[in-house]
Amino acid sequence: MEGRRERNKRIKKERILKAAIEHFTQRGFEQTSIESITRRAGVAKGTFYNFFKQKEDVLLYFLDKEIDLSRQEIQRTIHTKPTILEQLELLIVTYLKNIFKNREFSKVLVRERVCKIGTGKNRNELVLMRTIRELLEKAQHRGEIKQSVDLSRLEEIVFAIFTMYTIYWLNGFIVSKKQCVRRIRDVLNIFFEGAGSTSDKPQSRS
């Protein structure tokens, strides 16, 4: 059971997180100082350093927290989604809802936690890729994916599709997250079902 001291620490940490998200959204990351975060949160500057070394760590804490929440949510409902397409859509919807809360804050997340670190080196990104891989392995075991398919490459492709359309939404090429999910679902559907058919191939002329 959580004691009073632990509860007070958790509340202060959440206040700092909330204040940081508000400032990052309204002012941008570079224009936000630790002092402005603590002033908005109503805590001493030293309290910030009890939880975080630098403001980048606030973003990492947010991602760790929301990714864990997303994984729990997915695990509770994944049994209602029998196909790989439905499962991947659940994954995408859950991540977009919990992690990419609004466009401006999401731009900060992508720039600071992906672009500056690099793809394949971000631990939060690796968690998402591992979840995709787990779903693909189970789908292959069920016979939805051919045994000859390299799941490492398929994992990269699915992640790339998710990333590309998320960036489209961030840049305003896609209006809403709902439309973003629909685009991703449509592309994955084409990909998994196959874009062509042997019967559609032109007949060779003798």
Image (cartoon, helix red, strand yellow):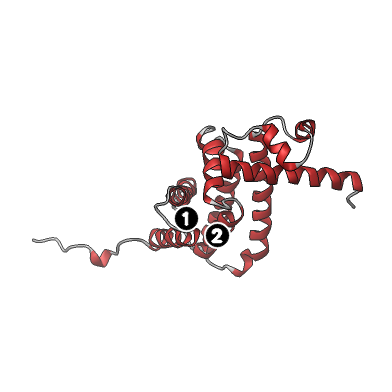
> Circle 2 — which element?
helix
Q: Residue at x 45, y 52 (%)?
A: 169
The disc labelled 1 sits on which kind of residue? Gln
Disc nearest the viewer among 1 and 2: 2
> Circle 1 — which element?
loop
- On screen, residue 132 versus residue 69, left or right, reads left
Note whether residue 75 is visible: yes
* First of labels 1, 2 by sequence position: 2
The disc labelled 2 sits on which kind of residue? Val
The residue where tag 1 is placed is 147
The front one of 201 and 4 is 4
Q: Position of residue 47 (x, y in %)?
A: 79, 34
- On screen, residue 18 versus residue 135, left or right, reads right
The residue where tag 2 is placed is 93
Instruction: Characterize the local packing of mark 1: few (<14), some (14-19) or many (20 or more) Cα atoms within 10 angstroms.
Output: few
Q: Residue at x 55, y 36 (%)?
A: 112
Q: Position of residue 153 (x, y in %)?
A: 45, 46
